[in-house]
Image (cartoon, grey):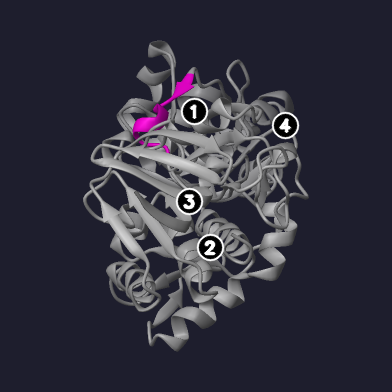
């Protein structure tokens, strides 16, 4: 039976980063993945260019039961650390919007860099390999595979969450955590389009394909980015962001005039161009199809000059259009999984279980979920690096 110092289950961003760091320290490392290729989420990310980090990464951009848990790893291996890693490898990158960094070329460059560094450090990469069971022993762990068993002093679970099951995502990591007595935080899809009941969808579905800038909020949290109307409901960056904060039964507020006072805008239109209809006024700031829907929803068929102050206030609801989603598109299209292995079960510096020595959890499987825009990859790099320093 083969023996390794470290066996890492999952050849994604966090797993490969952990393997590189551990092997560079002279540890014998095996990485196992059930997929036929490593780094598949890296490869498809960012339209094939990989939004690999964000210049503005800090713990405030992450959701978790313990908002402070991510600070240690993110501080010790920051966005600047990973940028330097890519730059030293000669991989060119650029900033798109809001601090989001992408490869100038293909995301495959990052996958090739990671697999190349693992090869240099003599990491044993096993693809198309299924872990059937993990058993704690007096000397570490035994992993039962489809073709025999292997042993290790330490095991790192880097299997990700449930998002995008067609790429092989599963709840394996959560099952391992439960088996060893670690607490789980309820999991749900994150960074996912929102869906609506038939009577609401009937109003917005005709706008499918239309994209506008909007501020979408729920409670005290809001994001101003693009909003996309779809045949199923709403998508786009602002919706994906707010989906991580929205819960079933709650509404969302959509401000179609972000940064402007909608009532002041309409008062100005009434004073300057009172012969206009509400739709004509809306058309100055919204696409025609959306302006027509908003006029139908919040106005009446008369000139602005004839609107009362109360009617103007109602028409100003485009600055706070309240909608009530009934759900999301689920893990099928979710970019991440919220929840996971509870942070109070892990050491924030090492990512090791507090109750099972030698068992580590890194990346998306942990209850740390970032905003859209490269934050989740940075958590993968940082948490994988942190575990790699000690396994």
Left or right relative to 65: residue 254: left
> For the residues marked 2 and 3, what is the alpha-carbon distance in whole angstroms?
23 Å
**Residue range (magenta):** 327-334
Mark 2 and mark 3 lie on one chain; the one further toward the N terminus is 3
Residue beneath disc 2? 381
* Disc 3 element: strand
N-terminal of the pair, mark 1 or mark 3, is: 3
Q: Which mark is residue 175?
A: 1
**Which dot marks residue 219?**
4
Asked if residue 328 is positioned above or below residue 107 in the image, the reply reads above
Residue nearest the viewer, comparing 306 with 232 = 232
Mark 2 or mark 3, which is nearer to you? 3
**Residue at the (24%, 55%) spot, across then down:** 37
Q: Badge 2: how crowded within 10 Å, few (<14), some, or many (20+)?
A: many
Vertically, is 129 above or below 177? Answer: below
Q: Quadrant of residue 46?
A: bottom left
x and y, in percent, of residue 264 in the image: 71, 45
Task: Report the Cα–Cα distance between label 4 and label 1.
Answer: 33 Å
Between label 2 and label 1, give the one nearer the viewer: 1
Report helix, strand or loop for mark 2.
Answer: helix
Mark 4 or mark 1, earlier in chain: 1
Distance from Cα at disc 3 to Cα at disc 4: 47 Å
Q: Residue under circle 3? A: 152
Mark 1 lies on a secondary structure that is helix
For mark 4, does the 10 Å Cα neighbourhood hold few (<14), some (14 to 19), or many (20 or more) residues? few
Where's residue 341, x and y in %? 61, 36
- Mark yes or no: residue 291 visible: yes
Of 129 and 344, nearer the camera is 129
């Amino acid at each position: 039976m083969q023996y390794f110092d470290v066996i890492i289950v999952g050849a994604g961003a966090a797993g490969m980063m952990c393997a590189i760091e551990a092997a560079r320290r002279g540890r014998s490392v095996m990485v196992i993945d059930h997929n036929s290729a490593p780094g598949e989420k890296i490869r498809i990310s960012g339209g094939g260019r990989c939004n690999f980090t964000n210049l503005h990464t800090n713990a405030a951009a992450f959701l978790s039961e313990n908002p402070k848990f991510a600070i240690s790893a993110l501080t010790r291996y920051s966005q600047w650390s990973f940028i330097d890693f890519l730059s030293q490898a000669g991989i060119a990158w650029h900033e798109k919007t809001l601090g989001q960094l992408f490869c100038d070329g293909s995301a495959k460059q990052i996958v090739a860099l990671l697999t190349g560094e693992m090869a240099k450090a003599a990491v044993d990469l096993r693809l198309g390999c299924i872990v059937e069971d993990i058993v704690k022993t007096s000397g570490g762990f035994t992993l039962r595979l489809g073709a025999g068993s292997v042993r290790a002093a330490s095991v790192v679970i880097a299997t990700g969450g449930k998002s995008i099951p067609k790429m092989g995502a599963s709840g394996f990591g959560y099952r391992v955590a439960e088996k060893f007595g670690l607490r789980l935080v309820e999991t749900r899809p994150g960074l996912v389009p929102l869906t609506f009941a038939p009577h609401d969808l009937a109003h917005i579905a005709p706008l499918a394909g239309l994209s506008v800038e909007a501020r979408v909020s729920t409670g005290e949290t809001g994001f101003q980015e693009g909003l996309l109307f779809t045949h199923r409901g709403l998508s786009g960056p602002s919706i994906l962001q707010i989906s991580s904060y929205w819960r079933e039964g709650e509404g969302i507020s959509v401000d179609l005039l972000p940064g402007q006072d909608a009532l002041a805008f309409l008062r100005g239109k009434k004073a300057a161009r009172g012969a206009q209809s509400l739709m004509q006024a809306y058309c100055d700031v919204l696409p025609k199809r959306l302006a027509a829907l908003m006029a139908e929803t919040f106005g009446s068929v008369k000139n602005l000059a004839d609107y009362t102050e109360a009617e103007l206030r109602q028409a100003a609801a485009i600055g706070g259009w309240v909608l009530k989603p009934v759900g999301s598109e689920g893990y099928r299209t979710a970019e991440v999984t919220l929840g996971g292995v509870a942070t109070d079960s892990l050491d924030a510096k090492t990512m090791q279980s507090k109750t099972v020595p030698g068992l580590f959890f890194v990346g998306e499987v942990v209850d740390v979920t970032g905003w859209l825009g490269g934050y989740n990859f940075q958590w993968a790099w940082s948490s994988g690096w942190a575990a790699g320093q000690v396994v």
